Structure formats: C-alpha cells, structure tokens
Image (cartoon, rainbow, N blue to C red):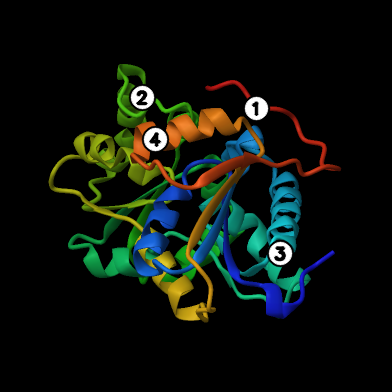
Amino acid sequence: MQTDSSSRREIGVFDSGVGGFTVLRELRALLPTARLRYLADTAYAPYGNRSPEDIRARSLAITEHLIERGAGLIVIACNTATAHAIDALRERWPALPFVGTEPGIKPAVAASRNGRIGLLATPATASSARLRALIARHADGHEVVVQGCPGIVEHIEAGDVDSAELRALVQRHCEPLRAAGVDTALLGCTHYPLIEPLWQAALGADVRLLRIETAVARRAAALWTPVPDRAGLHIETTGDPAALRAWIARVLGWRDGEVSGVALPGLAMPQRQPRP
C-alpha cells in the first residue's frame, strides 16, 4: 500500500550498496533539516554485474518500499540503476519526482583541453544504451573512452579502500585511459569517489577527475519542498545491518543514523557473485 501525498515527508535514496553514501553525504550538507531514508541493496551488490532485467526488478521493489515508508522524492544514487531503471520508475510513478545519477559528459567536454575524455564505470553502465545516447547527445565531437571496471565495487563494499590488490586493479582499469591520452576522467559510479586518490594516482596528476554527486544532491534539493518535521537519518540494508554500521563508522566516520535490516520478498536473483 502506498502512503498518500500528505504523509510523504522523506527523501528516499537508494543504491546497490554503499556507493550512494557519497550522494547522501552531500544531501545532508545541503538539506540539514530533511528526513532522509537510505536503502543499500547490499545483499545483491554489485548491480554492475547484473542483467538489466534484474536491476529494474530490484529498483522497482526498492522504490515501492521507500514510497510506503513516506518518500516524496526518490534519489537513485547509482549510475547503473539510473541507466537501466529510471525510465521504468518514472513510468510506474509519473507524479513522483526522481533524480538520477549519470556521468557528467557536458561538464567533462567543457573541462577537457585536448578533446579526449575517459569514463570509468561499472560493466552494466558501460554497456548501457542510455550511456551511449548520453555520449551521442553531449560529446560534441570529443573522444570518450569508456572503461568498464569489474571488481572495484566489491572491494569498496568490503571496506577495502587501500589494499595492494585494489591499487593494482585500479591501475589496470586506468591503462586504456592513459594510452588514449585523456586529460579529463569521469568517475561514473557513486562508489568510485570513495577511492578517488587511487584513481588520481593511477591516471596521473595532470588528469582532471570529475564527480557527479554534488550536482545530484543540488538537483534533489531544488525539487524538494521542505516540510515541518525534525531532521532524521534512517539507513536500511538488505544485507547485514551490523556489517554496514561498521563500514559507515570505519569509512565515513559517521556515528549517527539508525541502521536496520529490510526484506524485499518475491524477487529471485542470484546471490553475490565472486569477485573477478
């Protein structure tokens, strides 16, 4: 059952796992009095290795859950879910505002000096028709080197943000961008800013890195109508709440915000896939 509009007092935010916390962090800064509910679909992360059909099914179920809990605005803090599900979500709930997360091709074009841009993304985002259309609309003659990066999200989800194994994987994914001579690179997954220093080191100091989460949060803030209520942060996960609580404290340094488990029944999907 959906709540009526008068009880939709929260901003709902979701991601396949912890990547969307980069967007949530910006939302908390911009909207300090808002009630925020974040759902991490940790049991099924990463989305980047899933099929478009699975991603849409998860996104529809999560959005239904957030609406039932009182969301009046949905922020899809996940590039992969945006690429494969935002059209279906808008069709299902045409009156509800959605804010998606997509690589900033236009800002990258404006920032590039040599006309060569790199895009680091999950495999599902890298292969999506929505990304191809975005590049076709906004590249303006610039070369865009798209690199799918399997394995990165799994490390970040595990709280591994600085191991030798992760550094080697980042170096390998950055090799095509270095070979192409890009001078600007887009972090095309909300997880990736959590290891921004590793990307910068692998690409070199002369390559400018661009992120998207601040623009996403600003768009959400522009659409949100404040309601008379106390600020609040509720975090939910389809995985282990204790593990997520520990990750948040270790990586983000947050000690506030309730973390609870949630089940989204009726969706059959393979469990976590092994790390490449």
Q: Position of residue 221 (x, y in %)?
A: 44, 74
- Specify which label sits upstream in the sequence, 2 or 4: 2
Q: Position of residue 271 (x, y in %)?
A: 71, 27
Residue annotated with mark 1: 272
| Mark 3 Cα-neighbour bin, 10 Å: few <14, some 14–19, many ≥20 | many
Which amino acid, mark 2? Leu
- Specify which label sits upstream in the sequence, 2 or 1: 2
**As displayed, is residue 217 above or below residue 204?**
below
Residue annotated with mark 2: 166
Image position of 127 (left or right of 205): right
Residue 139 visible in image: no
Residue annotated with mark 3: 67
Q: Residue at x 52, y 64 (%)?
A: 35
Q: Position of residue 148 (x, y in %)?
A: 47, 40
Q: Residue at x 41, y 69 (%)?
A: 31
Q: Are marks 1 and 3 in contact (CB under 8 Å)?
A: no
- Specify which label sits upstream in the sequence, 4 or 1: 4
Looking at the picture, tell me which residue is in the foreground, 23 or 51. Answer: 23
Residue annotated with mark 4: 249
Which amino acid, mark 3? Ile
